[in-house]
């Protein structure tokens, strides 16, 4: 079976993040365009100290968002500026913080901005608090400077989960108390007896008092969870843990009150509670870190638009938009409802709704579709034709129930069965020991029963299993696969069908040149002109061409006077020569005295047969630049590997059926499994029809929202867009898809490891029960046996899930290419 975790011998790490460069990537030095863009900025701005602080690699960088609107920022800055005092203060959430290097970079960019008074970044929670002198600091300019490095800012919504603050405190208290109890217990094991009088009594009551605190502080999370499970009629996994804690503590209390503290299990009890808390903390640590990596999703309440009332311009939530409102849509802002364009023309992008990267022109009097973004360079005015409650966005932005309908049911049933059987078996065995030893006296019978409760502790469930999940989650995080749902790793082994949206998922949502012949045929002047024409357009084709020309050394001319002809292309009259870059069938200007434009037959004939975007000089074609959607570098390899491993791969897209079929053919996906032209509700129906109980869906647009709610698992690579990351069970970072297959593989392996841990626990408990029933178990032996088996299960878990040793290859340090000075 192919193993994406294994590196090829000729692979070198990404110069920015240290990840493996996918086979077929556009650059052999970078794993994705985001890393290449961020690395270039760090080098050009003299910020390469970032790599000294990154200490061995970071997560792949998200591609910097283009033209992202900041309408949400305006009311926050206005409120901060209106507060009394010489300094203004604002707290924001940040997406993408992962190490000390990120904190240093944000502080360094803040230091370079005039007017700033102070910046505090909390990397654990993903927050930044800035202070500046009133009227002297450009907040939006600073945010855009930081977002150019792949980060995103948003309103302050992140709050630490109660458990994230509660568990470390409880764990610290229990560790401190348990160490003292162990010291007292050692004295009992080396000979301190009731005959020693006051010292024995003092140590006994100190052990009892400290153990009471440990049970109260450390046991509470398990007691609460077990009780909540019982109220719902679900025997939670915490039930056997809670019962074990209470019964061992109760028996030890009886022994202490009778003057036999040496027969109590205080040290074992304290160790057990502390180890269970460690397991609980491990379960939550990586998941919370992944969730804080992203901005918090607030659905429609987190989206804003500018509304004009007379001479006043207000920034309001999209949910407040009513029919007849006059909206001002700034570059990068969302059109929340269908609206009539009042200005001359606008360029809009509907990729968030359709998933397709195409932009189109809308003329005055035409309708701007709900869900479009202003892709132009100027703000436009539009008249709302409906209230937001009637907008098609409402259904797509609604927040699903936690975990999604029906998700994780199989996982729950499995652990319910394990928990129920464990509880029944432990109680039955303890009762059996009590009955068998009752003829020898109540004290001996109680000692055997308690010993059975102690040694049958669910260490494999409470410690080793959480550790196994933490190891897998951390490993996937390094691969660029970030888990958000608690039970995702339990659902992934059930996946039999993998459904891909097309654009932005299997493709990168941007264009690439089909061939470089036209590019390489350009002379020096033509290359400079083509670059300056392309660089002044936001169209996806222009951005592709501008990046390619920039790599060839083309320079930007700030004095160029370029005119955009909507729907056709860009024009620049330079030195009396008319240069045009645009559609191959663009009407050419006839050299005549007439002010009107007409079709020049020879020039039209010259343009015939040209594909893609064409550069013209005085009407004559100079070069053609055919383009296509850029496929993810390892898309074909990963799709073929998924099918070879027994997964059905489907393409579910809103794009034209012909394009979807063409892509399916290039990826060797059967034509019958490529569905195009689907609306959001049709995508959701397709998921249900194919079998939602074993389906993984990967999409990037809000048109995938309804399908997300139906699938067993859902994820997105589009973390720079609102709403969808908050609905996802996982998200991907970087341009490769190998981490998805790695997650499926590791989830199956994890499932096997957990099963083995349970079998190991059953084997240990069988031996321990036999020892207890024979009357050979003592507090000292229990104190040794329980930590020993815990350590054994932990070592077994680490060994089972250890990463394969990477082959000796290129050891180029992250961020240190030989041509870049330190």
Image (cartoon, rainbow, N blue to C red):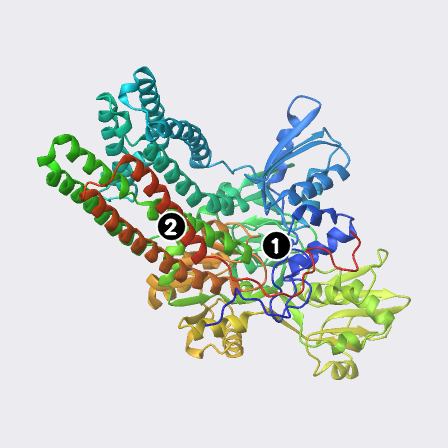
Image location of residue 427, percent across then percent down? 18, 42
Image location of residue 488, percent across then percent down? 40, 54
Res. 418 visible in picture: yes
Q: Nearer the viewer, residue 78 or 450?
A: 450
Is residue 320 left or right of 453 when viewed as pictured? right
Res. 485 visible in picture: no
Q: Quadrant of the N terminus?
A: bottom left
Is residue 737 left or right of 16 when viewed as pictured? left
Image location of residue 86, percent across then percent down? 71, 23
**Farthest residue, direction right:** 575
**Farthest residue, direction top:** 198
Q: Is residue 290 above or below residue 681?
A: above
Is residue 397 left or right of 106 when viewed as pictured? left
Q: Nearer the viewer, residue 118 or 421?
A: 421
Q: Is residue 76 above or below residue 747?
A: above
Per the image, label 1 sits on a secondary structure element best described as loop
Residue carrying label 1: 62
Closer to the eye: label 2 or 1: 2
- The crowding category of the residue bearing disc 1, from other C-alpha atoms within 10 Å (few below 14, some 14 to 19, many at least 20), is many
Q: Residue at x 24, y 40 (%)?
A: 777
Q: Nearer the viewer, residue 818 or 784?
A: 784
Q: Residue at x 32, y 34 (%)?
A: 269
Residue carrying label 2: 793
Per the image, label 2 sits on a secondary structure element best described as helix
Figure label count: 2
Image location of residue 383, percent across then percent down? 57, 49
Quadrant of res 307 = top right
What is the C-alpha distance between the residues marked 2 and 1?
38 Å
Q: Nearer the viewer, residue 758 or 545?
A: 758
């Amino acid at each position: 079976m192919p193993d994406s975790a294994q590196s090829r011998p000729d692979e070198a790490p990404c110069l920015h993040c240290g990840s493996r460069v996918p086979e077929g990537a556009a650059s052999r030095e970078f794993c994705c365009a985001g890393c290449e863009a961020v690395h270039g900025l760090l080098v050009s701005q003299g910020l390469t100290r970032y790599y000294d602080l990154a200490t061995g690699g970071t997560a792949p960088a998200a591609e910097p968002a283009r033209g992202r609107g900041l309408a949400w920022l305006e009311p926050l800055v206005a409120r901060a500026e209106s507060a009394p005092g010489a300094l203004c203060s604002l707290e924001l959430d940040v997406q993408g913080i992962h190490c000390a290097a990120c904190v240093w970079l944000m502080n360094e960019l803040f230091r370079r901005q005039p007017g700033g008074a102070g910046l505090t970044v909390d990397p654990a929670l993903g927050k930044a608090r800035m202070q500046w002198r009133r009227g002297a600091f450009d907040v939006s300019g600073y945010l855009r400077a930081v977002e150019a490095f792949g980060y995103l800012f948003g309103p302050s919504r992140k709050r630490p989960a109660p458990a994230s603050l509660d568990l470390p405190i409880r764990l610290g208290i229990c560790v401190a108390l348990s160490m003292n109890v162990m010291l007292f217990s050692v004295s009992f094991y080396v000979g301190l007896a009731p005959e020693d009088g006051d010292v024995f009594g003092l140590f006994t009551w100190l052990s009892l008092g400290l153990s009471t605190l440990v049970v109260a502080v450390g046991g509470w999370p398990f007691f609460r969870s077990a009780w909540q499970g019982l109220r719902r009629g679900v025997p939670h996994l915490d039930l056997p843990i809670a019962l074990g804690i209470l019964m061992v503590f109760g028996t030890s209390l009886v022994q202490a009150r009778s003057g036999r503290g040496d027969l109590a299990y205080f040290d074992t009890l304290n160790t057990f509670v502390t180890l269970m808390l460690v397991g609980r903390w491990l379960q939550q640590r990586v998941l919370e870190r992944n969730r804080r990596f992203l901005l918090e999703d607030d659905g429609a309440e987190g989206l804003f638009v500018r509304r004009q009332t007379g001479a006043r311009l207000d920034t309001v939530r999209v949910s407040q938009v009513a029919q007849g409102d006059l909206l001002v849509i700034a570059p990068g802002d969302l059109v929340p409802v269908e609206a009539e364009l009042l200005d001359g023309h606008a360029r809009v992008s509907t990729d968030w709704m359709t998933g397709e990267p195409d932009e189109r022109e809308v003329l005055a009097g035409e309708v701007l579709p709900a869900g479009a973004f202003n892709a132009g360079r100027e703000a436009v005015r539009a008249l709302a034709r409906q209230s937001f409650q009637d907008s098609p966005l409402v259904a797509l932005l609604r927040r699903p129930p936690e975990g999604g309908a029906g998700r994780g049911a199989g996982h729950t049933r499995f652990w319910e069965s394990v928990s129920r059987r464990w509880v029944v078996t432990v109680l039955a065995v303890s009762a059996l020991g009590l009955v068998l030893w009752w003829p020898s006296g109540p004290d001996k019978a109680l000692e055997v029963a308690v010993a059975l409760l102690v040694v049958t502790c669910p260490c494999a469930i409470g410690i080793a299993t959480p550790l196994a999940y933490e190891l897998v989650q951390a490993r996937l995080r390094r691969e660029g696969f970030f888990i958000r749902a608690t039970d995702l790793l339990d659902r992934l082994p059930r996946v039999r069908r993998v459904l891909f949206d097309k654009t932005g998922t299997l493709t990168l949502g941007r264009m690439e040149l089909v061939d470089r012949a036209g590019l390489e045929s350009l002379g020096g002047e033509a290359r400079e002109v083509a670059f300056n024409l392309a660089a002044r357009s936001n169209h996806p084709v222009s951005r592709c061409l501008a990046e390619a020309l920039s790599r060839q050394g083309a320079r930007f001319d700030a004095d160029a006077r370029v005119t955009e002809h909507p729907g056709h292309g860009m024009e620049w009259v330079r030195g009396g020569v008319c240069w045009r870059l645009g559609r191959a069938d663009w009407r050419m200007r006839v050299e005549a005295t007439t002010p009107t434009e007409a079709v020049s037959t020879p020039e039209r004939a010259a343009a015939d047969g040209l594909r893609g975007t064409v550069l013209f000089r005085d009407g004559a074609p100079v070069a053609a630049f055919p383009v296509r959607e850029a496929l993810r570098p390892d898309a074909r390899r990963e799709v073929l590997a998924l099918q070879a491993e027994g997964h059905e791969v489907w393409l579910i897209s809103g794009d034209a059926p012909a394009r979807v079929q063409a892509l399916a053919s290039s990826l060797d996906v059967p034509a019958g499994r490529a569905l195009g032209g689907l609306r959001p509700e049709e995508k959701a129906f397709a998921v249900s029809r194919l079998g939602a109980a074993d389906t993984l869906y990967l999409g990037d647009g809000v048109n995938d929202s309804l399908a997300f709610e139906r699938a067993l698992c859902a994820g997105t690579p589009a973390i720079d867009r609102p709403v969808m990351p908050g609905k996802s069970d996982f998200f991907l970072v970087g341009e490769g898809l190998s981490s998805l297959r790695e997650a499926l593989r590791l989830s199956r392996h994890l499932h096997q490891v957990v099963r083995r841990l349970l079998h190991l626990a059953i084997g240990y408990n069988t031996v321990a029960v036999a020892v207890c029933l024979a009357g050979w178990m003592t507090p000292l032996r229990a104190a040794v046996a329980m930590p020993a088996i815990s350590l054994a299960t932990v070592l077994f878990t680490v060994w089972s899930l250890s990463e394969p040793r990477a082959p000796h290859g290129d050891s180029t340090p992250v961020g240190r290419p030989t041509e870049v000075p330190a």
